[in-house]
Image (tube, coloured by chain):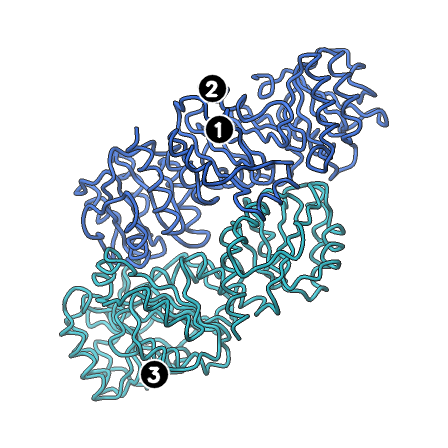
Chain colours: A blue, B cyan
Amino acid sequence: MEKFFIPNSVAVIGASSKKGKIGYEILRNVLSSGTKTYPVNPKRKEILGLKCYPTVEDINDEVDLAIIAVDAKRCIDVIERCGRKGIKYAVVISGGFKEVGREDLEKSMVEIARQYGIRIIGPNCIGVYNGSNGFNTFFQRNMQLPPAGNVAILTQSGTFGIALLEKFAQEGIGVSKFVSYGNKADVDEVDLIEYFLSDGATEVIAMYVEDIGRKFFERDFSKPVIILKAGRSKLGQRAASLHTGAMASRYEIFRGVCRQKGVIAADDFEEFFGVAKIIAMQGLPKGNKIDIITNGAGPSVLACDFIENTELELAGDVVDLTGSATASDYIKAIDESKADIILLTFVFQDAPLAETLDELYREIAKRKKFFIALAIGGSFVEEQRKKLAQLSIPSFDEPRVAIKSLNRVVEYAMRK
Amino acid sequence: MEKFFIPNSVAVIGASSKKGKIGYEILRNVLSSGTKTYPVNPKRKEILGLKCYPTVEDINDEVDLAIIAVDAKRCIDVIERCGRKGIKYAVVISGGFKEVGREDLEKSMVEIARQYGIRIIGPNCIGVYNGSNGFNTFFQRNMQLPPAGNVAILTQSGTFGIALLEKFAQEGIGVSKFVSYGNKADVDEVDLIEYFLSDGATEVIAMYVEDIGRKFFERDFSKPVIILKAGRSKLGQRAASLHTGAMASRYEIFRGVCRQKGVIAADDFEEFFGVAKIIAMQGLPKGNKIDIITNGAGPSVLACDFIENTELELAGDVVDLTGSATASDYIKAIDESKADIILLTFVFQDAPLAETLDELYREIAKRKKFFIALAIGGSFVEEQRKKLAQLSIPSFDEPRVAIKSLNRVVEYAMRK
């Protein structure tokens, strides 16, 4: 499936010359990655400075990947032409298939694709992103994309996919590859998990799903896999069926299977993101004993409340350095800690600490312990988050989320 | 208690000339609010361009408020001098009292204060902030402070107080007044709730507590009060006692009393902040029927899952405008909605919407409905959040938090 991520040449079928249109934005995004790009639209001779072709068969070159953004009804014909052209990979962005009751259109399209040996991602999706070279098939704009890294993101929801990518970008966490697979008419979660379990760049796999087949679980998971499943309730399942045509089975069954296979089923979006970032940045802890070191005890009291019913064990009392703490107070406490995990709570706004931040980061970088950070605030704190991310330290802005995510990671680590 | 918030003159006792020291930062903050300020420190003749006095009694002027940042052991003497000077209000920032086992120091200090009729906020706190004039007693730096508004914040944790203020600032939500009351040796939550229930600028009261007395509940709450209580568990209570000397009673009892009196007990920090901002910006909804309007269905599926076990009722199916939606699609759906509450989910990054944002905001401003927004993303989305806040629309970046917070607001509204 490499060509989905590193195509030598791409045809954008349904390219548009009008800014704001999906067919325009996709073309723009593909072009900006430096990939050889061919817009296809019978109504235009040229778009964004590129020669525009009436059909994909008119392109005088090999095409590795087709990105299709035309009406659902026309997709069957388009896929036929792609097949005749010899294209083997297609991303169908267009909606209007199973999720609106037109499963017939989807089935016909896939049938033709199979005749020609074309693999299809979608339909009704936003496609792919390759962290290492920036290639993407998106129609989004004003999006921050994350740097290259070790987390693969798989999603049935384009929206969640975008949200997750931006959050990764904001916090400086890297992504290997991203796939929004929509209605999964052809390429599904089974194809994807097989690919990513062997993808060298990927160490952690994070998935958002509305439905997931049993076949997905028929394997050993050699890498940490975190799944956020929606459509858990009647209301959610109805919304899911209208979204991607998903027919979700009972949530408790799903949770049970995950537990058996060592797959982490996240309770909500924040836990999902929290677990992914802890494992991506720190790996797995060697045990469950935790020390909390802080210069402002409030959030630590709540953190302790949340620790109560988890696998975590406090190694000792909260180490409260008080509001007059400087970097060296933190470093001393870190060096004295014998815990498996250190939760550093920072009130960055307290001037004595703010004055000594360079020293703090410099010295923490020399200590190879399992760190997570908790800090709540505005733009100054956001800057510090980025600095912590550069030290590969995941930081949280809410005690409940920090503890819950950490607990899931510890549960997983203690299983192995 | 007005003089705590609008003092004509302030003495900063324990002022320091060294940047980064608590006594320096407080002086700086007080000065920058334009209040007449007198630094007190026997070792200095001048700090920050102001004449520095050896003791507070040497000041040749009336002093309304004393902010005290000297060692706990010296506070008794300092309070005595303030008393002789005729000062009636003091904020004791210093720690080293009950929370480290020196309740005796605290009791002595308050005894002397009572002899002179001095009210004390603290000790072991960060003091006050007045949203309308910017006056504050903080030693923090690089802090964004929120604008003037209708929410009063009361907190036993300075750290949480800072976090909450910055979050309010970040999201453009206004604060009437803020009090961090630390060990509550004198002024306590009973004094404060009485004050704020009659404070004209305050419409919503948000409190973080580690312990809270029964007397607090012996009244009718004429304004919405939201409380985040920490120290719910053995672990948390131990941490709380080391923090402020709090002796917390059983959490279930607390929840029960809140339910009886119509006080909202928040489960966690995000729900606490979420409820406060919904009520501050939109007030109370007239019913529990909710419509979800979105251009990207993923988060809506999860939102529906979370709606399932709440007081909220979906008015109809999720209105999925799809990724090609523009402003006018949203406005049309808003106008067609008959629900009490409209949850607008925005994928701002989708170009068709991004192109029409001016129209979106202009038209939404004309519709007087009960709106909350959900949007997840990076800096572009953060900018949109601020624009929504200008329209007084609270926005969330996580479906679970949005629904849970909204549910608490609806529960409260349906009680009244």
List x then y, in percent, for residue B316: 67, 54
Whether B25 is drawn above or below A254: the answer is below
Towards the viewer: A395 or A317 = A317
Marks 2 and 1, the one that precedes in the sequence:
1
Kindly indicate whether the residues beneath marks 2 and 3 are on one polypeptide chain: no
Tag 1: residue type?
Answer: Ala
Marks 2 and 3, how far apart at CA:
68 Å
Tag 2: residue type?
Answer: Asp
Q: Which residue is mark 2?
A: A199
Residue A400 visible somewhere in the drawing:
yes
Towards the viewer: A280 or B290 = B290
Chain letter behind tag 3: B
Tag 3: residue type?
Answer: Asp
Marks 2 and 1, how far apart at CA:
9 Å
Q: Which residue is mark 3?
A: B64
Towards the viewer: B28 or A194 = A194
- Element marked by disc 3: loop
Chain letter behind tag 2: A
Q: Which of label 1 and label 3 is nearer to you?
A: 1
Residue B48 visible somewhere in the drawing:
no
Q: Is A414 left or right of A262, judged from the image as shown?
A: left
Residue at x 71% of width, y 18% of height: A111
Residue at x 49% of width, y 63% of height: B408
Q: Tell me the quadrant of the picture where the N terminus of chain B can be found.
A: bottom left
Chain letter behind tag 1: A
Kindly indicate whether the residues beneath marks 2 and 1 are on one polypeptide chain: yes
List x then y, in percent, for residue A201: 45, 22
Q: Which residue is mark 1?
A: A152
State if disc 1 and disc 2 touch (CB < 8 Å). yes
